[in-house]
Amino acid sequence: IQCSSGYSKDEIHSIRVRSALFGYGFFAAIGSILTVPLAGTAITHWWVEIKTRNGNWYVAQWENESKYLVLKEVSSQLQATKYGKKCTSGWNPEKKSDEVKMSYVCPEWKTRTIGELIDKCMDKQGEYNAVGNNNRHFAIAVYRWIS
């Protein structure tokens, strides 16, 4: 968890689940050809961008060099997207195309906090596995929990 103090009580306003292919061009195509039969999908990295009612931004994702889920506070939506894309290849994340898979805005009456997100969705451990899609499963679990 890479966040300023008091983050756990920060109420979630909205989330966006995003994904991007690993690699570029030819390498992304070859990787996807190999993984579609194994995993049923192309090699993609999924992450969750979170905006709170206080205007703070967070990124929640498996990082490819980590055995844990990571929650990082960032300065803006643009920074959240760049940080998520960085895990797909490391170079030129701002030029890499990505896709919003799902989004949700919490109604005023529904209160979900960053602390609850950590307690309910971020207790998974293990190795990052792009082919096994644990990053996608995590992002979908966050979406289901909040919606």
Image (cartoon, rainbow, N blue to C red):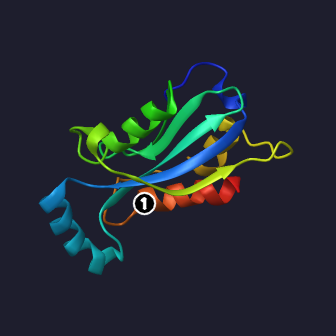
Which residue is the site of mark 1?
Answer: 134
Q: Could you tell whether 8 is left or right of 125 in the image?
A: right
Number of callouts in the render?
A: 1
In this rendered view, identify the residue nearer to me: 32 or 67: 32
Q: Could you tell whether 83 is left or right of 139 in the image?
A: left
In this rendered view, identify the residue nearer to me: 75 or 121: 75
Q: Can residue 124 be seen in this view?
A: no
Task: Identify which residue is drawn at 19% across, 53% down.
Answer: 24
In this rendered view, identify the residue nearer to me: 69 or 91: 91
Q: Residues within 10 Å of mark 1 (few under 14, many from 20)?
A: some
Q: In which quarter of the image is residue 30?
A: bottom left
Q: In this view, does 91 lie above or below 110?
A: above
- The percent position of residue 75, horizontal first and vertical second, equals 50, 24
Q: Can residue 85 be seen in this view?
A: yes
Of helix, strand and loop, which one carries label 1?
A: helix
Task: Identify which residue is drawn at 55% across, 60% down.
Answer: 140
Q: In which quarter of the image is residue 53?
A: top right
Task: Identify which residue is drawn at 41% across, 54% down.
Answer: 19
- The percent position of residue 94, horizontal first and vertical second, equals 31, 38
